Amino acid sequence: MAESELDGITQRSVTVNGIKMHVAEKGEGPVVLFIHGFPELWYSWRHQIVALAEQGYRAVAPDMRGYGGTDAPKEASAYTYGHVVGDLVALLDELGAEQAFVVAHDWGAVVAWWLCLFRPDRVKALVNLSVAFSPRNPKYKPVDMLRAAYGDDYYICRFQVLFPFLLSFLVLLFQYSYSILLCLS
């Protein structure tokens, strides 16, 4: 393990779910798993890692699949929610943690909802930052709703031209968001 100059935060690489994942961590006690957003890294959580470690928690923040020091498989099919949630479950196994408090931001919040949906047994509690929960509205297409609310320049609307598969992602997100909320209650 290499210790960074960032207040004793330890960084290492672990093998999870068939990839090498970069992880930053500090502290001992119950695990708090931080999930970063787009286009961030574990580093976004550096202040929270230190603060929670000082309060008796084991604060852990990975670089998600495809980001920073974590492997980035070339195939788009290697980035399903099954894969990214599988990465986090395997990381919890690697840490020896039955459950974790999960704190997520931006795209990481969406991943955290899927983690709660697929593996509610592994999540003690969830805090999502800056992403409001939106139940699916079957009367409207998700991108049309975002375009109406935020305009054509909203990044997700722009991605439709660059990354058509993002539409599928949003459709699935809105279809299952209500189920995710049920997992948390």
Image (cartoon, rainbow, N blue to C red):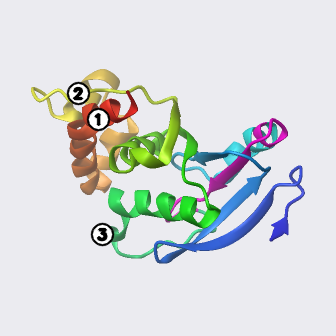
Q: Secondary structure at mark 3?
A: helix
Look at 60% across and 59% down and name the residue there. 63
Q: Position of residue 146 (x, y in %)?
A: 29, 30
Q: Position of residue 164 (x, y in %)?
A: 24, 54
Q: Which residues are magenta?
A: 52-67
Between marks 3 and 2 in the image, the one whose residue lies nearer the viewer: 3
Can you see residue 14?
yes
Q: Earlier in the sequence, mark 1 or mark 2?
A: 2
Look at 50% across and 65% down and name the residue there. 90
Q: Earlier in the sequence, mark 3 or mark 1?
A: 3
- The residue beneath circle 3 is 77
Look at 45% across and 30% down and name the residue there. 131
Quadrant containing the N terminus in the rendered view: bottom right
Closest to the observer, 147 or 51: 51
- Residue 96 horizontal side relative to residue 53, left or right: left
Look at 33% across and 30% down and name the residue there. 181
Q: Which mark is residue 177?
A: 1
- The residue beneath circle 2 is 145
Q: Secondary structure at mark 1?
A: helix
Q: Position of residue 99 (x, y in %)?
A: 54, 48
